[in-house]
Amino acid sequence: MSDFVKVSRDGDVAVVTIDNPPVNALSFHVREPLMQALVELRDDASVAAIVIACAGRTFVAGADITEFGKPMQQPELRAIVATLETIAKPTVAAIHGTALGGGLELALGCHFRVADAGAKLGLPEVKLGLLPGGGGTVRLPRLVGAVKALKMIVSGAPIGATEAHAAGLVDAVFEGDLTTHAVNFAGEIARKGGPFTPVRDRNDGLKQTDLAAFDAGAADLARKARGLEAPIACAQSVRNAVTLPFDAALAAERALFVKLVASDQSRAQRHLFFAEREAAKLPGKDVVKRRIARVGVIGAGTMGGGIAMAFANGGYSVILLETSHEALQRGLATIDRNYSVSVTRGSLSEDAKRERLAQFKGSTDYADLADCDLIVEAVFEDMAVKKEVFGKLEAVAKPGAILATNTSYLDINEIAASTSRPQDVLGLHFFSPANVMKLLEIVRAEKTAPDALATSVDLARRIGKVAVVVGVCHGFVGNRMLAARGSESEALLLEGATPSQIDQVFTDFGWPMGPFQMGDLAGLDIGWRNRKARGQKAVIADTLCEQGRFGQKTGRGFYLYEAGARTPVPDPEVEALIRDKAAENGIAPRAISAEEIVERTLYPLINEGAKILEEGIAARASDIDVVWVNGYGFPIGKGGPMFWVGLEGPARIIERLEYWHQRTGKDVFKPARLLKRMAETGSWEAGG
Ligand code: T1G
């Protein structure tokens, strides 16, 4: 056979084993020998049943994503599945690890599926801007019903073996040696005799479909799609499975797949898939990571509490330190409340909550941190306070402990230099709420040791974060670019735009919310304090803060918020204030187009990204995309700011930046060298 597909016999049961590390993707070099093996075994009378299994840590995790966008080599997956369905003898997929995308579709081509108790099964194509293209939208509903299939396919979230068994997706769940169980299962079925019904001919799951309920569910999902094409296509294709004959539904699925695979949105989301994995790769050779078992968090406020929860959720025991007993109790009570909310929502069981809380130990004594392998400081954002904390840490932290700061802006080299062990110091910049937001900016200071960095990147994955390593500068990657994006917001308001007009441009672009709504959510006082610390001014935002308008937390900011509500209501008072400030500054209001708003907010954002690349603060343009998509809600369908340059057109961006630079003289508009080179070469990478 081939190195990637091996056939063995166990009596009259043939076992086809796919072996294509690391995740048994269905690359061409797997598909070809697989097809050959299935045809031979189909026609081999000595074979009573066929088991398809995989070597390594997982069943097939999908089609080979690297092959998309290139001419597809035959045989394709759907041809292999169609061949599988011509096999009269029983075929059994033995699923361990993950059966995802094309992997689950291959298994759906079999008469039966058996799974290891720890297995996960799903069709995550929507996360790549696609829909299942190997018959998944047509076969899955036939087993689990249209409504469950819709939920699985539009969310892309995998389900566990037990749930899959209950739903009729797998026929048996085993512990222990799965292949042996599968061979026995197949042998028994063969001995019982057929006929064996391929999934394509099984309509049991479809019979009771309530189309009205289905359409209501699909409409709700469509509302949440925020301009993404794939979720809509997924829902349409599952509906076809209910309303159309099998082959017609399959052909319709194909047509949707071909359209999506060529779309900018899917290209963007595939870019992000690989970008997240690249971001976790550190240059240079692998280093031995430090052992992390016990974590200390200093500060039990909003950030400290969230960070502590992130580590407890990752299975680490956490010491939460505060300056006073009252502050500590307040912090622990907030953590308890947050877990209760998850229990109420059903995303956490009472038992799990108890287990998580048992991992916390509160303290007001620095000495209790002496045994910690990692200590994260999350105290007030002030350099003197940070240095004082690191001074105390020095006295208690054990050799080899990593000392991390959660600062969002401050100079970590300066904090490190205030200690005698700068090699152990780095930034772990979490995003609020830290127990929810996926992004973790890991800030490498000048003297940070490679093993401290590698340990932190590994740790991020263990607590379910997407890590990006960045260098030290004011605001690192995310906040520095955020400042550039916001640099013109006030000017746009003074010149005639309104907060809701600007926010609408952002939500139309695909953001969950615009800058003014985001400011009100985060609290306008944070930016105010930061500007005051830096001697900077923002005419309108400062005035709002002086009036106690800090946003949602005070019920009014750039918008008004009914008591306890989060819906922003435009406030005539704010618009009048803006008009007054404009008049005071001799600015006559004018009509401002959505295009101009994009040019004066997103183009400076990109330009700053290019400068960050030039300075080596970020190692790759794709790292910047990972930061913005996972930390700032940049629309995934646009791939991140640096990828979006390719969609928007670098030449146009430069031409408009130069226009605004000319008009305003502001540096944020002066096109960066690397952006110009990107326009010439079409790539951010050195050498184009
Ligand atoms: N194709 C190509 N490479 C893949 C791959 C895939 N499907 N999945 C993973 N890799 C690479 C990945 O880039 C990394 O490479 C290495 O494998 C380890 O991955 C027709 C249209 C399975 C849960 O969306 O979700 O089927 O960085 O670091 O954390 O309908 O990988 O080492 O060079 O992520 O243990 C649908 C994608 C495809 C699942 C394992 N399938 N994979 O996670 O390892 S579309 C998916 C994952 C499709 C059909 C359609 C995860 C994983 P490198 P890793 P992990």
Image: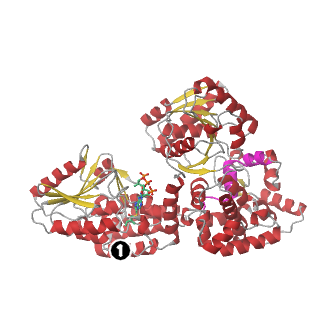
Q: Position of residue 344 (x, y in %)?
A: 48, 41
* Near-viewer residue (418 or 499): 418
Q: What element carries label 1?
A: loop
Q: Position of residue 616 (x, y in %)?
A: 65, 56
Q: Give the range drawn in magenta.
A: 511-531
Which residue corresponds to the image point at 67% horizontal and 43% vertical from the top-left? Answer: 407
Q: Is residue 541 left or right of residue 99?
A: right
Quadrant in the rendering for residue 570: bottom right
**Taken as a whole, is the magenta stretch helix, strand or loop?**
helix
* Near-viewer residue (86 or 512): 86
Which residue corresponds to the image point at 60% horizontal and 28% vertical from the top-left? Answer: 397
Whether residue 389 is visible to the viewer of this picture, yes or no, is yes
Quadrant containing the C terminus is bottom right
Amino acid residing under circle 1 = Gln
Q: In which quarter of the image is ligand 1?
A: bottom left
Residue at the limit of the structure toward the front, as seen here: 285
Per the image, the residue denoted by label 1 is 73
* Near-viewer residue (529 or 70): 70
Q: Residues within 10 Å of mark 1 (few under 14, many from 20)?
A: few
Quadrant containing the N terminus is bottom left
* Near-viewer residue (564 or 302): 302
